[in-house]
Structure formats: C-alpha cells, structure tokens
Image (spheres, grey):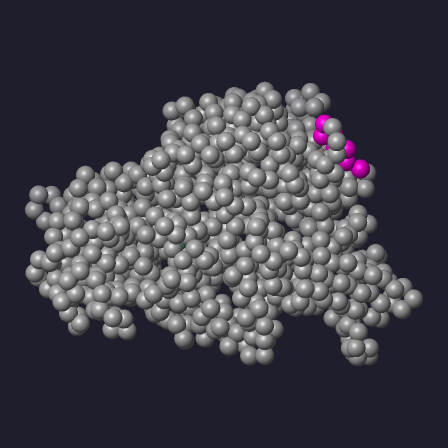
Amino acid sequence: SAAVRREDYVAPAYWVRTVELGFDLDPAKTRVVNRMQLERNDALPPQPLRLDGEDLDVTRVLVNGDSVSFRHEAGQLVIDSVQNLPAGPFTLEIRNTCAPERNTQLSGLYTSGGGFFTQCEAQGFRRITYFPDRPDVMAVYTVTLRADRVRYPVLLSNGNLVEQAELPDGRHLATWHDPFPKPSYLFALVAADLVAREQRIRSRSGRDHLLQVYVRRGDLDKTEHAMASLIASVVWDEARFGLPLDLERFMIVAVGDFNMGAMENKGLNIFNTKYVLASPATATDEDFAGIESVVGHEYFHNWTGNRITCRDWFQLSLKEGLTVFRDQEFSMDMVGPAEGPGAAAAATARAVKRIDDVRALRQVQFPEDAGSMAHPVRPDEYVEINNFYTPTVYEKGAEVVRMMQTLVGRDGFARGMTLYFERHDGQAVTCDDFAQAIADANPGSALAVRLEAFKRWYAQAGTPRLQARGAWDAAAGRYTLTLQQGEATAAGRPLRAPMVIPLALGLVAADGRALPLRLAGEDAGAPAPLERLVVLDARETTLVFEGLDAAPVPSLLRGFSAPVLLDDGLDDAGLLTLLRHDADPFNRWEAGQRMALARLLAAVRAEGPVALTLDEAYVDAMRALLDDASADPAFKDRVLAVPASAVVAAHLSPVDPVRIDEARQQMNRQLARRLHEAWLRAWDANRVDGPYRPDPVSAGRRALAGRALAMLCLDAQATGDTVWPGRAYQRVKDADNMTEGLAALRALVDSHAELAEPALARFHQRHAHEALVIDKWFMLQALAPERDGRVFARAKALLKHPDFSLRNPNRARSLIEALCSGNPGAFHRADAAGCVFWADRVLELDAANPQLAARMARVMDRWRQLAEPYRSAAREAVARVAAKPDLSDDVREIVTRALE
Ligand code: DPP
Ligand code: ZN
C-alpha cells in the first residue's frame, strides 16, 4: 500500500462510543460478534463509513438491527448508504470469523503454547474484527469470552471481571468491562491454561488493588521479581509524579511467542516471557534489570499512553519517548536517590545506568540516524507503521524528553507533567501538546523562551554534530570556548536549522581541581559555580571564562546532556585528566572510551594488515583504574569495555567491518596480556559470596569478575595456560546463578578454548527445558568473535539444530539477529555468504511474520557505507530481497528505502 503522511491527518468521520465484543474461541475458526454504538462526527460533512479489516471473513453487517449493503475496498469495509447511518447514535453489528491458529504474524488474535493471546498495537485489532482502527477513536469495551473450560480455564480481558458462568458442552464464559474509553490498539484478551502470582496492595491514596502475574504452570517460581518490579513501579509513579494506579485489578500475562518486548493493554499487559520470567538459575543480572525496566515501562504507559494517548501514529514518541524516559528515571531511582541524603553515594551507580543507556543509544540509534531508515522522532510518513517502533522514536525520543527536564529542572518537569494531565487526560493528542504543557508550566524557562526552535528535535532527522575548540590565555586567566553546530548525520537531508542543545559543562585543571566557571561580565566577587548548563541555540556560540588560575580541560556534555556527536578535539593528555579527575562520572567513562576509540581508529585506518599496539600511557591508565580499590566495579567494567563496532564505524567512511573487528579483537587480547596481573586481582577482589541477589552492587562485582575471567581465558589461549579455562569450565558446571554460569561459558566460547565444546554441551543439557536459557545458548555462539570463519559456519549449522525455530521470535532473534547485526566481523565475508544467509532468512521469515522479517531486514540500512567487497555483496542481497514480487509492506518499505 501507499505511504501515509502526517500532514494528511483528518479527524474520524465516525466516533465509536461503546463496543460489545463476543468471542467464541476456537483455534481454527473463532466467531466474533462486534456490536458498536457509533455517532457521526458532525464537524465533518456526512460520508461513507469505513472500517478496517484484515484476514477476516464477514458474515453479517447490521445497522440498528437491519442488514445493510457494504463493499470491500483497499482493506476496508465500506458502507456507502449514508441515509442508513443516522446523524444521532446508531448501532452497528458485525459478525465475522478469524483463524487464530493460522495467524503466524502474531498480530491480532493468535495461538501460542495452546492458548489464545492478542497483540493489537499498532494495527492488530483490524485482524480481529472490523473497526475504525486508529488511536483517536476511543470507546468503552465490554467483552464476553466463551471457550472450552478445560483447555482454557483462564479467560481475561481489559478492566474488571463482571460475570463468570459455566456453559453446556464443557464450555465457560467470562465477561469483562473496562470503564476507561480506549483506542482499539489497547484491547487485549487471553484464554489459556495459566496460573497467577497474586498480591493485594493498598496504594498511597488508600485504594486497594489486586496485582496478578499470569504464567504457564511450572513458571510460577520465576515471577517474584516481576511482581516486585510491578509494586515498585506503582510506588514510584505515585511518589515521583503523583500518578496513582487507577484500576482495581492490574494483570500481567507472559507469552512465549511475542513480537515485541511487552504491551501496555489497559489493565491487561501482555509480555514476552523474556521480560517476566526470572530465577537466579535462569536469568542474568541484565535480565533482572531488563524485567524491572520493562515492567516499569508498561505500567507507566497506563498514564503516558493509555490515559493520554496518541492522536495518530506519527505521534508515537508522545507515549514511547516519554515512557522510555520514565522507565530510565525509574531504574535510576531504584539504584539510589538523585537528591537528598544518599545522593552522593549513589552518584556513580546512577551514572552507570546512564552510561548503559547512552551506550545503547550510540550502538543502535546513532546508526539508524545515519542510515537509510533515518527519520525524525516524529516521522512525516510511513508505509508500514510497525517499521517505526524504532530506537529513534523510543530512545532518541526519551533524550528529547530528558533535555526538556534538563531545561526546566526536575521540579519544573513534574509541574509540566501535572499540567499535561490537567489539560489532556482522556484525550488523544500530539507531541506539540506535550511540549506546550511542559513549557507553559515553566514560563520564562530556557525551554519556554525557545520552544519553537527546541521542537526541531521532533522534526529533523539525523544526529547533530557539535564541535568545540578552546583557546587559553594564560596571562589573562581567560579561556575562550567556541562551539559550532555542524550538519547532522542523516544522509541526503537538507541543511538543518540550529538545534537547541543543553550543554552541561565543567572545567578541570591538570592537577584535578574543578575550576570555577565565571563567564565574562559576571561579578568577580561572587562565588562561581563548578558546573553550568549553557543552552546553545545558534550555529556558533562563544563562551568566555575568566579568573582562571590554571589551564583548563573542558568537560563538555556532562551526563550526555544532549544526543549529539561531540568533537572537542581533546588529546590524550586532556582525556587522561578527565579520566582521572572529572567530577562527572559519565565523562570519566567517556574519556576512557575516547582513548580506546582513538587507538582503534588509528589501527583501522592504517595501510596494510591491522596491527594495533597499545601504548604504555593507555595501558597504565587502565591498570590504575582497575587497581583503584575506591572505584566502583560496575564503572570499571564499563570503562574497560572495548567500544562497540557500531561506535567505531560511526567515525569511518567507508566502513570495513572486518578490519574493525580485527582491531577490537587485538585490543582485547592486548588488554588481556598487558593487564594480566590486574585481572587476577580484579577476579579475586570481586567474588560475590552469599545467596544471589540482583542488586546493582553485586551485579557490578559480577560484571567485573566476569570480564576478568574472560580476559584470563583469552590470555590463556595465547600462553597455553590451562588453569583458567579449567576454572571457567568448572564454573559452567556448578555456578548457582545464570550470570556467573553464562559469563564462564562466554569466556570459553569467546576465547575459542577447547573446553568450549563440552561446556556448551553441558550447559544445553542442564537447561534444555528453559526456552529463555536456550535462546542465550544460541545467541552466545552467534556473537562469538570470529576466527577463520568458524563462528559463521557454526551459526549456519545451528539453523538445523532441533531446538531452532524461525517461528518463535525470541529464538529467531537469538540466532539470526545476533549474527547479522550483533556480529559484523563474522557476518561480513569476502565470499558474500553472510549476505546470502541474510537474504534467505528475510525471505523465509517474511512469508510467516513480516514484522519480524522487517526487523531483520534493517541489518542492511547502512550497506552504502560499507567498503568493498562487502558493499557489493550487501547490495546484491538487498536487491534480491526487493525483487521478490509478493513481499510484505513491512519488508518492502525497508529494502526500498535501502536502495533509494
Ligand atoms: N509494546 C510496546 C511498548 O511498550 C509498544 N507500545 O513500547
Ligand atoms: Zn512503550
């Protein structure tokens, strides 16, 4: 189908006030009776009634009880006879059937593990029944489910349970009523054989609520953390934003086949098992953190997304950017407080969370901004909306909200949220409405006075570049900093207007002192702050700092105060000063990463075979940090991590992924060799005793110990040592938690140790019945550093493993996405076999699950930037996919844009 454009928005011609849905659930043929109360939108001239529908069989259409003639046109059911559609309220009844067991797209109503589940965002409801399937049509739903009592003992839908009854023939029914008007994308139903962990809570406002986490029998012992995360989310949203739980009953249901991470259906969140199930034996520290953040995310949607929703899908970031921001803040507050007692102690741990979020942004969103799918946070057009659930809409969208908070302050932002709900509760609105509310609640703020310019963050694609150059006048004690905004990364876009960039900064002396920041013209007698926020809104800004008694090193963009690519021109000496002394832990980390990046880039750019030799200065700095007993283990782990391939690639043109991979591997081997003694000490110092707990302190220690073990095994490969691989193998056998067991397995696999094979076999045998653990087993093999083509060959062979299935999204991602997008060094090959593999899988997947296929197709977004021979191989593969005649809209949009 054709592209949809944001500027073409028109209000709906008909409103739906109430919906009564009746389901006779049957895997082969489910019967749906859909009775709606409609009203013409009298702001528009009378026009035909159009309802969306996909893969449905319609049996009857009645208006006020009478049959009416209709036709099908472009995926819609159209009733032309406007005279039959009265101006006042009328009833429209549709009877249709659908086939859940044949629904491999996992959009709409489908079966998984013998139960029925739904996924309606963005446009799945039209695969259940005919409806104006757009988010600005909000209705009150009453849903009756009828199904076999034995096979489907649990029958759930949104809202509150109002009736349950036994039926003849071994069937039963349940009726649910959701009092909140909602768009169709928030509809959900579940009918399955499940059990629930339950918890009754009384919220701050004194209301009682029932919280439930539904899983398959046998998984109940893995629901404690999800429940704890849900309770923490309820408490946090009320404390931080004054937003209480508005439902008597809040349900989470886990399902093994799910395209997304989770879905915020009103009162009935449906989750990928990956973000619910966790026990120490099956889930890593990262999984525990992921569950906390996704449970939080979906819960927070209840206000930001459900109570106030999107007018149209171009506004997706209205709910997603804001809700990612909220879940990031939640996770950070769970680590420790931002202000008040305990804040100083929590600062580094909070910074580690920020570092992880920024790492993800740079690894995934920055490349998106620089590739064929680059789009603004609020896109202007789409062919398939599912393709726009992107890191730009989510993660960059969250950065935009974060900048608003930075510009108006934490309290000012909370006031803005309050005004947003005062104005728009119960409505479907736009990103403009949100920004306006935050600005209006903070008149005179740096945001309010530049609101129109600030909103370019919603409108312009690409990552803005910012260049900073300083000039030091020792005699005058004056430092002049010139900041210039360059062009953004998005390929082929017109020159953009300057962005509003909040720049948090400090100045650090070579001896480590934080220097006072007195701008020229300010009172020399008054105390000057040690950190400032400067708002850049012009192409060029000059800042003059006076009264300095030492040459400063600029520490810019502290805490990553804006999502830009900064070039500050700092040399090793400056970076070392920041790494050692910066008061901002984020920028300390950044300085260490920048030093590593410079060395990788030099090695990749040099002529001839890649030959990276780490210099003493860098090795000494890393050793000093590793041996610094006062430094936080999680922080050390993040500094010692070699920058990701995508981060290195962002600075290269053309991009040779194999050279990048080679340089990264050499760097890891040298860090392993040269810091051998320090890794031994880190291993010894970071043992975690006692029962497993996923708290950030023990997780940080495990992360660093895991890295030390990986380094010791890597070095053992070079020296012939067998002790460390032996220890790792022992740990695979008897670790009492998945974090340590998996880290040990990875240490063996990544170092290509001989013990990797038996370790993989043992691990598989031990966890054969835990699908989420077997996903890890596949993924770890697909992500191993390539050596002589062995990793690629193994990944290809794993396609035929009896546990592999393309139909299960988690499993497909764990092998295919991991190899194609997570392991560029193995995927890109001179013989083009990686690209052939990719094209085959995308075509295979597209026939069953276009959404998932389109996700995999994104691997080739940046093929144009590749060096030869990888570029030609990639182009050929993309062209082959594009040439397939009956491609889904999803994949077609991705490959067409890639070839444009
Ligand atoms: N399930 C997705 C999310 O929560 C889409 N809303 O972000
Ligand atoms: Zn979301």
State yes or no: residue 614 in magenta. Answer: yes
Q: What residue is at 60 percent from the left and 46 percent from the top?
A: 700
Q: Classify residue 194 as left or right of residue 461.
A: left
Work out whether 812 lies above or below 492: above
- Write down the region rendered in magenta: 609-615
Q: What residue is at 32 percent from the left and 52 percent from the top?
A: 123
Q: Classify residue 588 as left or right of residue 89.
A: right
Front-most of residues 774 and 843 = 843
Q: What residue is at 47 percent from the left and 50 percent from the top?
A: 390
Front-most of residues 709 and 308 = 308
**Whether residue 162 can be seen here:** no
Work out whether 98 lies above or below 436: above
Q: What residue is at 57 percent from the left and 39 percent from the top?
A: 864
Give coordinates of residue 873: x percent, y percent: 54, 30
Q: Classify residue 217 as left or right of residue 791.
A: left
Work out whether 818 lies above or below 108: above
**Whether residue 181 can be seen here:** yes
Q: Classify residue 442 as left or right of residue 259.
A: right
Looking at the image, which residue sits at the far right? Answer: 475
Number of marks drawn:
0
State yes or no: residue 78 in magenta. Answer: no
Magenta: main secondary structure equals loop
Front-most of residues 217 and 78 = 78
Give coordinates of residue 892: x percent, y percent: 40, 42
Give coordinates of residue 593: x percent, y percent: 69, 46
| Residue 77 quadrant | bottom left
Give coordinates of residue 362: x percent, y percent: 59, 48
